[in-house]
Amino acid sequence: DWSSDVCSSDLGSDARLGETVARGDAIHVIGVNPATGTGTIIDIPRDTGASIPGHGVDKINAAMSAGGPELLAQTVSNFVGVPISYVITTNFDGFMGMVDDLGGVTVNVTKRNVDSFSGANFEVGSVHMNGTQALAFNRNRHGFPTGDLQRSENQGYFILQALTQLRAQNPGPVATLGLLGNL
């Protein structure tokens, strides 16, 4: 029951330096119930087919280039059936900066990660990742038989690990806003 949750969509943009049009490359819906302090995450692979208001059916990530974060939030909201209250978006530099400002993020790599396109090269086990390594881990899709599905799963897991680490550090509201300033 998501009725009491505050839902946000976490969105990674595929825009490169100097590009003005971007697609949503990493899409995750995070629901938080403030009363219980619990949360839920839904990972949505970027190539998922969805109805984009005013644009017909396309890959869900096309909503970003068709109408920005607002249209993507509306599309995702319609797709999952819950209102999206907030959208958080970042690019590669913002993502790496946030991870580095956290002091890195430790993840348990469950499948060998090797992908020359993303630069991922991780053995199975606990790995403390800096921003550059975290970006490679989160972009890796070529090194898995299920491609983007495994990448979305890895991204969702990484978000949970980063949030767990942030909560454990208990940086307070001002420092948390500083971290979000990277996005």
Image: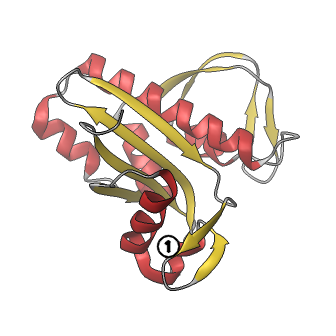
The residue positioned 27% from the left and 38% from the top of the image is 5
Return the x and y of residue 84 as percentages of the image width and height.
33, 55
The residue positioned 51% from the left and 40% from the top of the image is 42
Image vertical order of residue 97 relative to residue 123, above or below: below
Identity, as a three-letter code, of the amino acid under mark 1: Met
Q: Is residue 96 left or right of residue 84?
A: right
The residue carrying mark 1 is 64
How many C-alpha atoms fall within 10 Å of the one at disc 1: few (<14), some, or many (≥20)? Answer: many
Image vertical order of residue 13 relative to residue 152, above or below: below
Q: In this view, does 147 lie to the left or right of 165?
A: right
Residue 87, image quadrant? bottom left
Q: In which quarter of the image is the N terminus?
A: top left
Return the x and y of residue 11 as percentages of the image width and height.
46, 56
Return the x and y of residue 144 as percentages of the image width and height.
84, 39
SS class, disc 1: helix
The reply to whether residue 104 is in sight is no
Q: Which of 4 and 168 is in front in this view?
A: 4
Q: Which residue lies furthest to the right in this view?
A: 145
Image vertical order of residue 155 relative to residue 20, above or below: above
The residue positioned 47% from the left and 66% from the top of the image is 75
